[in-house]
Amino acid sequence: MSKSQDYIKTDKDHYGKIFVDISYAIDNIYPFLDSSILNKRKYAVKFPVIKKYLSLLDSAELEAKKNTGFKSLFKTDNSTSLLDSYKRDNNESLVQLENCSKCACLNCTAQCNFASCAGCKSKSYIKKCDHEQYNITFHENFTLELTNNNSGNTNRYKVLATMEDCVNDKKYIAIENIMNSQDKFILHYYSNISGDDFGEITDGEEFDAIASLYESSNY
């Protein structure tokens, strides 16, 4: 198998599974959701992107098969150049579709009171949802630069998760110092037009409940 054929097979296996998972989900929930709700879900909006990519993979596979044998030693194989270009141009959508395929919302038909897709940042997905009060979102490459009010030191933190309490209309964020994994915080999270703000959770019972919620998402 040539390098091009191996490249194509790997992507067909990877993106083919994502396509099947999302296609099945759309077919599964379509009878139970109003089309206006379904069409707000990111995976429904972005679905044509992965469908077209799989079509390009099929075409590239046929082209790669033509470039085998003795003659291929004297011919440049460009069968994957269009694939690379398409993936670059649609990277955000393809990454989001991969995250959507892992999201707790994928097959959900519950009456939703959460922000759901409207509150989902790029390269994120909902890891866990109880359909009543809490959900937990995991993020990829979501970092923050924060200054400690007491010490004045500024550090960069990676976001471990964000959590939403739709009953009390609150959000929380779990963060970890990139340079010191022992330096972790769970804070109130206020997201608004002017930017993100954070605050200490001063209520002990509230903190324990959110800490327990975060820990449960890792299992």
Image (cartoon, rainbow, N blue to C red):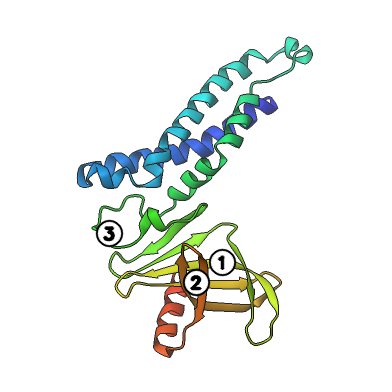
Mark 1 to mark 3: distance in Å? 25 Å
Tag 2 secondary structure: strand
Does the CB distance between marks 2 and 1 fall below 8 Å? yes
Taking the image as shown, residue 177 lies to the left or right of residue 173, namely: right
Residue 218 makes an appearance in the image:
no
**Residue 152 sits in which quadrant?**
bottom right
Badge 1: how crowded within 10 Å, few (<14), some, or many (20+)? many
Residue depicted at 35% across the width and 54% down the height: 105
Above or below, 32 against 195 in this view is above
Mark 2 or 3 closer to N-term? 3
**Residue 48 sits in which quadrant?**
top left
Q: Which residue is mark 2?
A: 173
Mark 1 or 3 closer to N-term? 3
Q: Where is residue 178 shown, x and y percent of the image? A: 67, 69
- Per the rendering, the mark at residue 112 is 3
**Residue 150 sits in which quadrant?**
bottom right
Tag 1 secondary structure: strand
Q: Where is residue 209 shown, x and y percent of the image? A: 40, 81
